[in-house]
Amino acid sequence: MKKILVPTDLSEISLKALDVAADLARNNGAEITLLQVKIFPSASLGTYYSMGVAVPFDTAWKGVLDDAQNELNAIIANPKFEGLKIKAVVEESVENFESTLLKHKADLVVMGSTGATGIKEMFGGSHAESIVRHANCPVLVIKGDKQDYPIQKVLIATDMENTDFIKKAFKWLNMPEIEYHFVYVDTAMRQINYEVLKEDMKKVASKLKLKNYHFDIWDGANVEEGILDSAHQIKADLILMYTHGRTGLAHWFKGSIAEDVVNHSDIPVMTLS
Protein backbone atom coordinates (compact mmCIF):
# COMPACT_ATOMS: atom_id res chain seq x y z
CA MET A 1 0.00 0.00 0.00
CA LYS A 2 2.67 2.44 -1.03
CA LYS A 3 1.83 3.93 -4.43
CA ILE A 4 -1.09 6.23 -5.21
CA LEU A 5 -1.74 7.09 -8.85
CA VAL A 6 -3.52 10.39 -9.54
CA PRO A 7 -4.42 11.01 -13.19
CA THR A 8 -5.02 14.65 -14.06
CA ASP A 9 -6.15 16.83 -16.94
CA LEU A 10 -5.56 19.94 -14.79
CA SER A 11 -9.32 20.37 -14.29
CA GLU A 12 -10.52 21.56 -10.90
CA ILE A 13 -11.98 18.18 -9.93
CA SER A 14 -8.77 16.30 -10.84
CA LEU A 15 -6.72 18.69 -8.69
CA LYS A 16 -9.11 18.14 -5.79
CA ALA A 17 -8.39 14.44 -6.21
CA LEU A 18 -4.70 15.24 -5.72
CA ASP A 19 -5.51 16.97 -2.42
CA VAL A 20 -7.40 13.89 -1.21
CA ALA A 21 -4.55 11.64 -2.33
CA ALA A 22 -2.12 13.82 -0.40
CA ASP A 23 -4.09 13.26 2.82
CA LEU A 24 -4.15 9.50 2.24
CA ALA A 25 -0.43 9.50 1.43
CA ARG A 26 0.36 11.22 4.72
CA ASN A 27 -1.71 8.71 6.68
CA ASN A 28 -0.19 5.71 4.93
CA GLY A 29 3.39 6.78 4.22
CA ALA A 30 2.68 6.41 0.51
CA GLU A 31 4.12 8.17 -2.51
CA ILE A 32 2.07 9.75 -5.29
CA THR A 33 2.47 9.62 -9.05
CA LEU A 34 0.70 12.57 -10.67
CA LEU A 35 0.05 11.46 -14.23
CA GLN A 36 -1.03 13.42 -17.28
CA VAL A 37 -1.57 11.48 -20.49
CA LYS A 38 -1.19 13.31 -23.79
CA ILE A 39 -2.86 11.43 -26.61
CA PHE A 40 -1.04 11.83 -29.92
CA PRO A 41 -1.94 13.84 -31.91
CA SER A 42 -3.25 16.38 -29.41
CA ALA A 43 -5.37 19.47 -29.98
CA SER A 44 -2.65 21.28 -28.02
CA LEU A 45 -0.51 21.22 -31.16
CA GLY A 46 -2.71 23.98 -32.54
CA THR A 47 -1.14 26.40 -30.07
CA TYR A 48 2.16 26.21 -31.90
CA TYR A 49 0.74 26.49 -35.41
CA SER A 50 -1.62 29.34 -34.53
CA MET A 51 1.40 31.58 -33.95
CA GLY A 52 1.98 31.75 -37.70
CA VAL A 53 5.52 30.47 -37.37
CA ALA A 54 6.78 27.43 -39.25
CA VAL A 55 7.49 24.84 -36.55
CA PRO A 56 8.58 21.28 -37.32
CA PHE A 57 5.94 18.78 -36.21
CA ASP A 58 8.29 16.96 -33.83
CA THR A 59 9.33 20.25 -32.28
CA ALA A 60 5.72 21.26 -31.74
CA TRP A 61 4.88 17.92 -30.09
CA LYS A 62 7.92 18.17 -27.82
CA GLY A 63 6.71 21.63 -26.86
CA VAL A 64 3.32 20.18 -25.88
CA LEU A 65 4.98 17.59 -23.64
CA ASP A 66 7.40 20.09 -22.12
CA ASP A 67 4.58 22.54 -21.35
CA ALA A 68 2.59 19.76 -19.67
CA GLN A 69 5.60 18.72 -17.59
CA ASN A 70 6.20 22.29 -16.45
CA GLU A 71 2.56 22.64 -15.42
CA LEU A 72 2.72 19.48 -13.31
CA ASN A 73 6.01 20.52 -11.74
CA ALA A 74 4.45 23.84 -10.73
CA ILE A 75 1.50 22.02 -9.12
CA ILE A 76 3.58 19.70 -6.95
CA ALA A 77 5.83 22.59 -5.91
CA ASN A 78 2.92 24.03 -3.91
CA PRO A 79 3.92 24.32 -0.22
CA LYS A 80 0.82 22.35 0.82
CA PHE A 81 2.50 19.21 -0.53
CA GLU A 82 5.67 19.75 1.46
CA GLY A 83 6.99 16.54 2.99
CA LEU A 84 5.25 14.31 0.47
CA LYS A 85 6.96 12.30 -2.23
CA ILE A 86 5.16 13.24 -5.45
CA LYS A 87 6.44 12.35 -8.90
CA ALA A 88 5.05 14.31 -11.85
CA VAL A 89 4.84 12.21 -15.01
CA VAL A 90 3.72 13.21 -18.51
CA GLU A 91 3.16 10.25 -20.76
CA GLU A 92 2.46 10.31 -24.49
CA SER A 93 0.26 7.68 -26.01
CA VAL A 94 -1.45 6.80 -29.27
CA GLU A 95 -3.96 4.70 -27.32
CA ASN A 96 -6.84 5.88 -25.17
CA PHE A 97 -6.53 7.40 -21.72
CA GLU A 98 -7.87 4.39 -19.81
CA SER A 99 -5.54 1.77 -21.28
CA THR A 100 -2.53 4.01 -20.72
CA LEU A 101 -3.45 4.67 -17.10
CA LEU A 102 -4.08 0.99 -16.36
CA LYS A 103 -0.54 0.09 -17.45
CA HIS A 104 0.73 1.87 -14.35
CA LYS A 105 0.96 -0.41 -11.33
CA ALA A 106 -0.51 1.28 -8.28
CA ASP A 107 -1.98 0.29 -4.95
CA LEU A 108 -4.69 2.93 -5.25
CA VAL A 109 -6.02 5.18 -8.00
CA VAL A 110 -7.51 8.51 -6.91
CA MET A 111 -9.23 10.41 -9.69
CA GLY A 112 -11.79 13.15 -10.14
CA SER A 113 -14.93 12.80 -12.20
CA THR A 114 -17.77 15.12 -13.02
CA GLY A 115 -20.08 12.18 -13.59
CA ALA A 116 -22.73 11.69 -16.23
CA THR A 117 -22.33 15.10 -17.85
CA GLY A 118 -18.55 14.85 -18.18
CA ILE A 119 -16.10 17.55 -19.20
CA LYS A 120 -14.47 18.30 -22.53
CA GLU A 121 -11.31 16.33 -22.05
CA MET A 122 -11.10 13.03 -20.21
CA PHE A 123 -12.70 13.08 -16.80
CA GLY A 124 -16.35 12.53 -17.63
CA GLY A 125 -18.37 9.67 -16.24
CA SER A 126 -17.56 7.13 -18.95
CA HIS A 127 -13.83 7.30 -18.24
CA ALA A 128 -14.25 6.85 -14.48
CA GLU A 129 -16.60 3.92 -15.13
CA SER A 130 -14.03 2.25 -17.35
CA ILE A 131 -11.28 2.61 -14.75
CA VAL A 132 -13.58 1.20 -12.05
CA ARG A 133 -14.45 -1.75 -14.30
CA HIS A 134 -10.92 -2.71 -15.27
CA ALA A 135 -8.57 -1.58 -12.49
CA ASN A 136 -6.84 -4.27 -10.46
CA CYS A 137 -6.55 -2.01 -7.42
CA PRO A 138 -8.95 0.13 -5.37
CA VAL A 139 -10.26 3.22 -7.14
CA LEU A 140 -11.35 6.34 -5.26
CA VAL A 141 -13.43 8.67 -7.44
CA ILE A 142 -13.80 12.22 -6.15
CA LYS A 143 -17.15 13.82 -6.97
CA GLY A 144 -19.04 17.00 -6.15
CA ASP A 145 -18.06 20.63 -5.83
CA LYS A 146 -16.88 20.88 -2.23
CA GLN A 147 -13.67 22.65 -1.32
CA ASP A 148 -12.60 20.02 1.20
CA TYR A 149 -13.25 16.29 1.29
CA PRO A 150 -12.91 15.07 4.88
CA ILE A 151 -13.59 11.35 5.24
CA GLN A 152 -15.48 11.01 8.50
CA LYS A 153 -18.71 9.19 7.66
CA VAL A 154 -18.47 6.21 5.31
CA LEU A 155 -21.39 4.30 3.82
CA ILE A 156 -20.51 0.68 3.07
CA ALA A 157 -22.89 -0.97 0.61
CA THR A 158 -22.96 -4.71 1.25
CA ASP A 159 -24.77 -7.79 0.00
CA MET A 160 -23.40 -9.88 2.92
CA GLU A 161 -21.81 -12.27 0.45
CA ASN A 162 -18.64 -10.35 -0.35
CA THR A 163 -16.99 -8.57 2.54
CA ASP A 164 -13.27 -9.16 2.06
CA PHE A 165 -13.08 -5.89 0.09
CA ILE A 166 -13.85 -3.98 3.28
CA LYS A 167 -10.60 -5.11 4.90
CA LYS A 168 -8.67 -3.79 1.92
CA ALA A 169 -10.42 -0.44 2.20
CA PHE A 170 -9.71 -0.20 5.92
CA LYS A 171 -5.97 -0.36 5.16
CA TRP A 172 -6.29 2.96 3.37
CA LEU A 173 -8.99 4.47 5.58
CA ASN A 174 -6.93 4.03 8.73
CA MET A 175 -8.45 7.01 10.51
CA PRO A 176 -9.88 6.16 13.95
CA GLU A 177 -12.50 8.92 13.83
CA ILE A 178 -14.35 7.39 10.86
CA GLU A 179 -18.00 6.45 11.45
CA TYR A 180 -19.04 3.38 9.46
CA HIS A 181 -22.59 2.89 8.20
CA PHE A 182 -23.46 -0.41 6.53
CA VAL A 183 -26.46 -0.60 4.21
CA TYR A 184 -28.20 -3.52 2.57
CA VAL A 185 -30.58 -2.53 -0.21
CA ASP A 186 -33.77 -4.57 -0.34
CA THR A 187 -35.39 -4.49 -3.78
CA ALA A 188 -37.58 -7.57 -3.19
CA MET A 189 -40.49 -6.01 -1.30
CA ARG A 190 -39.41 -7.36 2.10
CA GLN A 191 -39.10 -10.96 0.93
CA ILE A 192 -35.86 -11.37 2.88
CA ASN A 193 -35.53 -12.34 6.53
CA TYR A 194 -34.45 -9.15 8.28
CA GLU A 195 -33.51 -10.87 11.52
CA VAL A 196 -31.18 -13.27 9.72
CA LEU A 197 -29.67 -10.35 7.86
CA LYS A 198 -28.97 -8.52 11.10
CA GLU A 199 -27.27 -11.60 12.53
CA ASP A 200 -25.16 -11.84 9.38
CA MET A 201 -24.13 -8.21 9.91
CA LYS A 202 -23.00 -9.00 13.44
CA LYS A 203 -20.78 -11.76 12.06
CA VAL A 204 -19.29 -9.36 9.50
CA ALA A 205 -18.64 -6.74 12.19
CA SER A 206 -16.97 -9.36 14.39
CA LYS A 207 -14.78 -10.49 11.50
CA LEU A 208 -13.77 -6.88 10.89
CA LYS A 209 -13.29 -6.26 14.63
CA LEU A 210 -15.78 -3.40 14.56
CA LYS A 211 -17.45 -2.47 17.83
CA ASN A 212 -19.14 0.75 16.79
CA TYR A 213 -21.05 0.72 13.54
CA HIS A 214 -24.50 1.36 12.11
CA PHE A 215 -26.54 -1.01 9.98
CA ASP A 216 -29.63 -0.20 7.91
CA ILE A 217 -31.78 -2.18 5.53
CA TRP A 218 -32.92 0.22 2.86
CA ASP A 219 -35.89 -0.23 0.53
CA GLY A 220 -35.11 0.85 -3.00
CA ALA A 221 -36.53 0.45 -6.49
CA ASN A 222 -33.04 -0.69 -7.49
CA VAL A 223 -29.69 -1.12 -5.84
CA GLU A 224 -28.11 2.04 -7.24
CA GLU A 225 -31.02 4.20 -6.08
CA GLY A 226 -30.96 2.61 -2.63
CA ILE A 227 -27.23 3.22 -2.19
CA LEU A 228 -27.41 6.84 -3.30
CA ASP A 229 -30.55 7.62 -1.27
CA SER A 230 -29.15 6.11 1.91
CA ALA A 231 -25.82 7.90 1.42
CA HIS A 232 -27.60 11.24 1.20
CA GLN A 233 -29.80 10.39 4.17
CA ILE A 234 -26.82 9.91 6.49
CA LYS A 235 -24.81 12.68 4.79
CA ALA A 236 -21.97 10.31 3.94
CA ASP A 237 -18.56 11.63 2.94
CA LEU A 238 -17.72 8.46 1.03
CA ILE A 239 -19.49 5.47 -0.50
CA LEU A 240 -17.54 2.22 -0.27
CA MET A 241 -18.62 -0.68 -2.43
CA TYR A 242 -17.55 -3.87 -4.14
CA THR A 243 -17.17 -4.45 -7.84
CA HIS A 244 -16.13 -7.52 -9.70
CA GLY A 245 -15.60 -5.50 -12.84
CA ARG A 246 -15.72 -7.44 -16.07
CA THR A 247 -17.21 -10.69 -14.82
CA GLY A 248 -19.72 -9.63 -12.17
CA LEU A 249 -21.14 -11.72 -9.32
CA ALA A 250 -24.12 -13.97 -8.84
CA HIS A 251 -25.85 -11.38 -6.67
CA TRP A 252 -26.35 -7.63 -7.22
CA PHE A 253 -22.83 -6.24 -6.95
CA LYS A 254 -22.00 -6.62 -10.60
CA GLY A 255 -19.69 -4.17 -12.28
CA SER A 256 -22.54 -2.19 -13.74
CA ILE A 257 -23.92 -1.30 -10.30
CA ALA A 258 -20.62 0.17 -9.14
CA GLU A 259 -20.19 1.99 -12.44
CA ASP A 260 -23.69 3.47 -12.26
CA VAL A 261 -23.12 4.65 -8.70
CA VAL A 262 -19.79 6.24 -9.70
CA ASN A 263 -21.42 7.91 -12.67
CA HIS A 264 -24.43 9.37 -10.86
CA SER A 265 -23.19 10.04 -7.34
CA ASP A 266 -22.25 13.51 -6.17
CA ILE A 267 -20.45 11.88 -3.22
CA PRO A 268 -16.95 10.35 -3.56
CA VAL A 269 -16.99 6.61 -4.23
CA MET A 270 -14.32 4.00 -3.50
CA THR A 271 -14.60 0.68 -5.33
CA LEU A 272 -12.65 -2.48 -4.64
CA SER A 273 -12.69 -5.97 -6.10
Image (cartoon, rainbow, N blue to C red):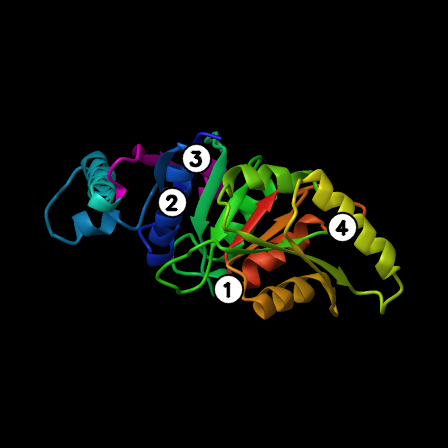
Magenta residues (range): 81-102
Q: Residue 28, labelled with which disc? A: 3
Residue 194 falls left or right of residue 165: right
- What is the count of numbered marks? 4
**Callout 2: helix, strand or loop?**
helix
- The disc, 1 or 2, on the residue closer to the chain's N-terminal end is 2
Q: Amino acid at mark 4?
A: Met
Q: CA distance from mark 4 to mark 1?
A: 27 Å
Q: Which residue is mark 4?
A: 201
Q: Amino acid at mark 1?
A: Asp
Dot 3 alpha-carbon crowd within 10 angstroms: few under 14, some 14 to 19, many 20 or more: some
Q: Amino acid at mark 2?
A: Asp
Q: For the point 22% across and 34% down, which residue is it?
A: 58
Q: Which residue is mark 1?
A: 266
Q: For the point 60% across and 70% down, which residue is it?
A: 233
Residue mark closest to the camera, 4 vs 1: 4
Q: For the point 81% across and 49% down, which residue is it?
A: 200
Q: CA distance from mark 3 to mark 4?
A: 28 Å
The picture quadrant where one finds residue 185 is bottom right
Q: CA distance from mark 1 to mark 3?
A: 26 Å
Residue mark closest to the camera, 2 vs 4: 4
Dot 1 alpha-carbon crowd within 10 angstroms: few under 14, some 14 to 19, many 20 or more: some
Q: CA distance from mark 1 to mark 2?
A: 20 Å
- Outermost residue toward the left in this view: 53
Q: Which residue is mark 2?
A: 23
